[in-house]
Structures are given as structure tokens and as C-alpha cells.
Image (spheres, rainbow, N blue to C red):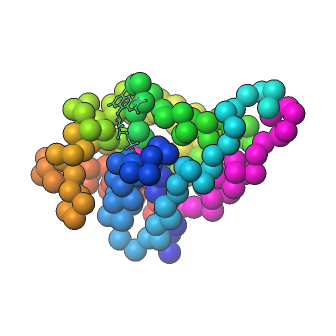
Amino acid sequence: MKKILAIGGSNSKQSINKQFAVWAANELDGVDVEIIDLNDFEMPIYGIDKENEHGIPPEAHDFKSIVKNSDGVVLSLAEHNGSYSAAFKNITDWVSRIEKGTWAGKPMLLLATSPGGRGGQGVLSTAKAAMPHQGAELSGTFSLPAFGSNFDATVGISSDELRVEFQKQLALFKEAIG
Ligand SMILES: Cc1cc2nc3c(=O)[nH]c(=O)nc-3n(C[C@H](O)[C@H](O)[C@H](O)COP(=O)(O)O)c2cc1C
């Protein structure tokens, strides 16, 4: 069975992005979903001096091997001041120092959601441009605006229009994981 990682790009215990990523990954039939909690990969704030003095923390190596041992990644990004959350960016900075290609060539369904009407479109457009350079095979992107109104814990995306668009992007990801 294919192993798919569900990652919320946030360290919030109540993360709506984690909730969204887990739901999205479970929309795929017949896959094994592994939920990644960024709190399990907390490391010092990346700095070249810290790296030179202490090396790359084991949590970064752990994260990298989890990615390598997966068949694809469903990542939903939280938007903080128009960009990545510090928790997410710190992990990718450390992991990027291990070797080229942080995402190990894996297919990625790239999502974002926020309570507001823009649905994390700022961070999503940054990530869309960046992920292919960081070793992700970008295979679908989708932003869910106004999470509180458009997502329901039991049915998932509650707006028909948004659900149809999401399913199109999910189909692209499904094709990529084979
Ligand atoms: C420091 C900070 C900055 C934020 N900046 C933005 C922002 O630029 N755009 C936005 O839509 N929401 C912003 N928000 C609101 C987040 O979208 C909201 O907290 C959301 O729940 C984050 O996702 P999460 O629940 O997965 O952590 C910000 C929240 C925090 C705490």
C-alpha cells in the first residue's frame, strides 16, 4: 500500500491546516496515511554558526528519512504574515542542509487554508514557485478560503464549487503517485 504523509505547516495543536491535510489525504482510497506533527521536529532556529558548531539535529535527519520512505506528500500550509510559519520554515531550512532535494522527488499535493477569505494564497504562491526547486514533484495545488465556513469535520469541504476544484487537484496527485 502507498504511504502518504499528511503534513500541516503549523505547530498549532488546533491547526486547521493539519486537519485539512489529514482529511485531504484520507480522500485517497487504498493508501496508508501517516500524520506528521511539526512539534515532533522542533529544533533550534537555523543558523550557520549553530550548524558548524553542533551539526544538523537528529530531528532533521528523521524528517528526511520519513519523506524518503513515503510515496507522496499532502502538505497544507499555514500563512503567517503572508509566508510560511516559522515552525515549518525552520524544519525545511535544517533538512535542506542534509542534501539537495528536501522533498526527495516525491509527488506533492500543495494546499493552504486560513480563516480569512484569501485562504493562504500568499504562502501558497510562494510555495508553488519554491517547491519544484526543493525536490517536490508538484502535482496539484488548492487553497480553501474561510475554513470555518467552507469545511465541516464530518463532510469535509462543504461548498460544492470548491469541492469540485479540490477533487480535480486530488486527481492530479492520485495520478502522480500511481
Ligand atoms: C503570527 C500570525 C500571522 C498570521 N498571518 C496571517 C496572514 O498573513 N494571512 C492569513 O490569512 N492568516 C494569517 N494568520 C491567521 C492564520 O491563518 C490562522 O491562525 C490559521 O489558523 C493558521 O493555520 P493553523 O491553524 O494551521 O495554524 C496569522 C496568524 C498568526 C498567529
Q: Find ligand 1 in the image and state its quadrant.
A: top left
Q: Position of residue 43 (x, y in %)?
A: 67, 42
Report whether 150 appears left or right of 137: left
Can the viewer see residue 131? yes
Picture quadrant of residue 45? top right
At x 69% / y 37%, what residue is drawn? 44
Q: Is residue 94 above or below residue 4?
A: above
146 to the left or right of 78: left
Please report the residue visible at 46 percent of the width from the left and 57 percent of the height from the top: 6
Q: Is residue 71 magenta?
A: yes
Q: Residue, x 55% and y 39% (percent of image)?
A: 87
Q: Is residue 163 above or below residue 9?
A: below
Residue 145 locus on image (x, y percent): 24, 38
Quadrant of res 176: bottom left
User: x, y (%) of residue 106?
Assistant: 55, 52
The quadrant the C terminus occupies is bottom left
Residue 65 sits in quarter: bottom right
Give the residues in magenta.
Answer: 51-76
Q: Position of residue 68 (x, y in %)?
A: 64, 57
Please say whether residue 59 is one of the residues in the magenta stretch: yes
Looking at this rendering, what residue extends furthest in the left direction?
160
Name which residue lies at 22% across and 65% down: 154
Outermost residue, front direction? Answer: 13
In the displayed structure, does residue 116 sit left or right of residue 59? left
Q: Taking 65 as reference, is 130 left or right?
A: left
